[in-house]
């Protein structure tokens, strides 16, 4: 019995809370609010309180089925793999540039050391470079140092 009375009281309180509200100006010029305006008052009804705002349709929902979840997972995994490959290529390129720079600098030091530079020709014979050839080779190596070391 007590439970039923309690339930009835809660229902009446909830019904009162959702009643129509009005706004009016009294004789003293004050704005008043209430659920029943006085007779003869120019009352304007207020909007009824709404519950929680509905989510906008543009909000993205997660995948709802296991197949969609699996597809999203595979897509993320492929993107991560591509990122790893891109990073590995960038690291390899950086290492190649560093190695090429070191080789070009070593060649430059060798040419500037003043020692005679020898090459092997097509017949397998050792041939020493002349001054003009050394100058030409030094210019080429300087371009390589500038290209790889900057």
Image (cartoon, rainbow, N blue to C red):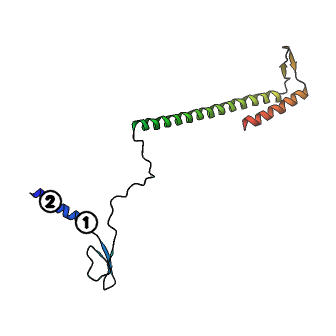
Going 76% across and 34% down the picture, which residue do you hit? 145
Residue 44 placed where, x, y %? 34, 76
Q: Position of residue 143 (x, y in %)?
A: 80, 35
Residue at the far bottom in the pictured view: 27
Location of residue 104 with respect to 26 vertically, above or below? above
Of the pair 61 and 80, the residue shown nearer to us: 61
The picture places residue 80, in percent across and down from the top left corner, at: 52, 36
Labels 1 and 2: the sequence-earlier one: 2
Q: Name which residue lies at 34% across and 84% down.
A: 29
Left or right placement of residue 79 versus residue 109 in this view: left
Q: Residues within 10 Å of mark 2 (few under 14, many from 20)?
A: few
Who's the residue at 60% across and 35% down the image? 86
Task: Out of 90 and 106, give the one closest to the viewer.
Answer: 90
For label 1, count other residues whose C-alpha is less than 10 Å away and answer few (under 14), some (14-19) or many (20+): few
Q: Secondary structure at mark 2?
A: helix
Which disc, if any, is residue 17?
1
**Total tally of numbered discs in the picture:** 2
Residue that carries the numbered disc 2 in the rendered image: 6
- Name the secondary structure under disc 1: helix
Q: Which residue is at a point 58% across and 32% down the rendered structure image?
A: 85
**Up/down of 13 relative to 120, above or below:** below
Looking at the figure, which quarter contains the C terminus? Answer: top right
């Amino acid at each position: 019995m007590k439970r039923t009375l309690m339930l009835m009281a809660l229902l009446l309180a909830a019904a009162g809370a959702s009643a129509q509200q009005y706004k009016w100006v009294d004789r003293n010029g004050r704005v008043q609010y209430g659920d029943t305006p006085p007779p003869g008052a120019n009352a304007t009804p207020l909007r009824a309180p709404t519950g929680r705002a509905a989510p906008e349709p543009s909000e993205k929902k997660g995948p709802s089925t296991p197949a969609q979840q699996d597809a999203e997972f595979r897509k993320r995994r492929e993107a991560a793999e591509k990122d790893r490959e891109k990073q590995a290529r960038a690291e390899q390129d950086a290492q190649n540039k560093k190695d090429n720079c070191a080789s070009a600098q070593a060649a430059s030091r060798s040419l500037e050391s003043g020692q005679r530079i020898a090459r092997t020709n097509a017949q397998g014979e050792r041939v020493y470079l002349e001054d003009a050839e050394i100058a030409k080779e030094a210019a080429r190596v300087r371009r390589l140092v500038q290209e790889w070391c900057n």
